[in-house]
């Protein structure tokens, strides 16, 4: 059986026209209803209340959603309208009613019965990326390629937050990804996805290399020097991934003093600096030093 599918039981002695309307109302292929209520109203010249009455009063329909992850039997749900069926298909159960009644209502650390994990798996099985536009799919691929929220935020999201963030939220609603937040401060910690998603979309995260166009960090003054040979400024720095500076690219190195005695160290490619400078055209003229400080502040 190919899921999801529908099975309709008709009342006896129905007019052929009524049976035809009901059959077309519930006709589904690739998770999509072929005849919307609007199409059926226009085709048969009936009102929406009349269409609702024909479907509900002359038949009973069951949605065969999927296979139960426990007993492997079909998950069967009574439905009375396309909207109800769509809701169940897009937000599915993963256990039949019998298995749900047997499950501990508060399972701990059980990946097999985790609703979130099952939703992510179901989204892959249902190939929910087919619901995306070409541009939305490109963003999903970026999420997988970066596999690091901080890098994704810096390289993609922050370049046009109003454009990219709604797409990220849509990916989360479709359960292609899961936005994981710090429960205390509600800050985003990670964008999680199943490895199977990368496999399905044929994206190899391990081969992705990010070339840095800029680096910037603060280095405090070392006040307790015991030897003249010790550095004046010192700070341990830990990066969350490999840092690559591309061969043949010209960089500007900038160092300036701060009021607290520390220094700022900045490294930025000439190309990125020029692009930033061009974006400021039309406003008051600024010196290159002012542009650098704006970029690295």
Image (spheres, helix red, strand yellow):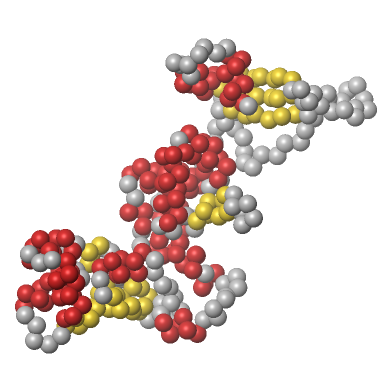
Residue 114, compared with residue 165, is above or below; it is below
Residue furthest to the right: 226
Instruction: Between residue 48 and residue 261, name the one nearer to us.
Output: 48
**Measuring 69% from the left and 24% from the top, which residue is drawn there?**
265
| Residue 179 coordinates in the image, percent (x, y) | 52, 53
Give the image quarter of residue 174.
Answer: bottom left
Residue 2, compared with residue 152, is above or below; it is below
**Measuring 75% from the left and 29% from the top, which residue is drawn there?**
219
**Measuring 13% from the left and 66% from the top, which residue is drawn there?**
47
Instruction: Specify whether residue 206 is in view.
Output: no
Direction from residue 66 to residue 272 in the image, left or right: right
| Residue 189 coordinates in the image, percent (x, y) | 59, 50
Residue furthest to the bottom: 12
Direction from residue 258 to residue 13 in the image, left or right: left
Give the image quarter of residue 253.
Answer: top right
Give the image quarter of residue 106.
Answer: bottom right
Direction from residue 252 to residue 146 in the image, left or right: left
**Measuring 30% from the left and 70% from the top, which residue is drawn there?**
85
Instruction: Between residue 210 and residue 133, name the one nearer to us.
Output: 133
Quarter holding the C terminus is top right
């Amino acid at each position: 059986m190919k899921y999801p599918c529908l099975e309709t039981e008709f009342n006896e002695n129905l007019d052929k026209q009524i049976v035809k309307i009901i059959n077309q109302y519930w006709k589904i292929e690739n998770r999509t209803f072929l005849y919307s209520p609007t199409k059926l109203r226009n085709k048969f010249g009936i009102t929406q209340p009349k269409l609702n009455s024909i479907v509900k009063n002359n038949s009973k329909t069951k949605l065969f959603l999927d296979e139960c992850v426990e007993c492997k039997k079909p998950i069967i749900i009574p439905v009375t309208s396309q909207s109800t069926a769509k809701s169940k298909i897009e937000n599915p159960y993963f256990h039949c009613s019998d298995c749900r009644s047997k499950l501990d209502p508060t399972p701990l650390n059980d990946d097999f019965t985790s609703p979130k994990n099952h939703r992510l798996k179901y989204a892959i099985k249902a190939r929910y990326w087919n619901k995306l536009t070409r541009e939305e799919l490109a963003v999903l691929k970026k999420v997988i390629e970066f596999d690091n929220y901080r890098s994704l935020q810096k390289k993609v999201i922050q370049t046009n937050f109003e454009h990219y963030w709604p797409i990220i939220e849509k990916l989360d609603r479709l359960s292609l990804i899961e936005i994981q937040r710090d429960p205390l401060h509600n800050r985003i910690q990670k964008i999680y996805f199943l490895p199977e998603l990368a496999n399905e979309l044929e994206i190899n995260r391990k081969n992705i290399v990010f070339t840095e166009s800029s680096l910037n960090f603060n280095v405090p003054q070392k006040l307790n020097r015991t030897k003249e040979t010790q550095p004046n400024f010192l700070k341990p720095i830990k990066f969350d991934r490999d840092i690559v500076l591309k061969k043949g690219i010209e960089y500007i190195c900038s160092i300036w003093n701060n009021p607290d005695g520390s220094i700022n160290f900045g490294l930025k490619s000439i190309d990125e600096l020029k692009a930033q400078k061009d974006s400021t055209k039309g406003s008051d003229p600024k010196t290159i030093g002012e542009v650098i400080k704006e970029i690295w502040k």
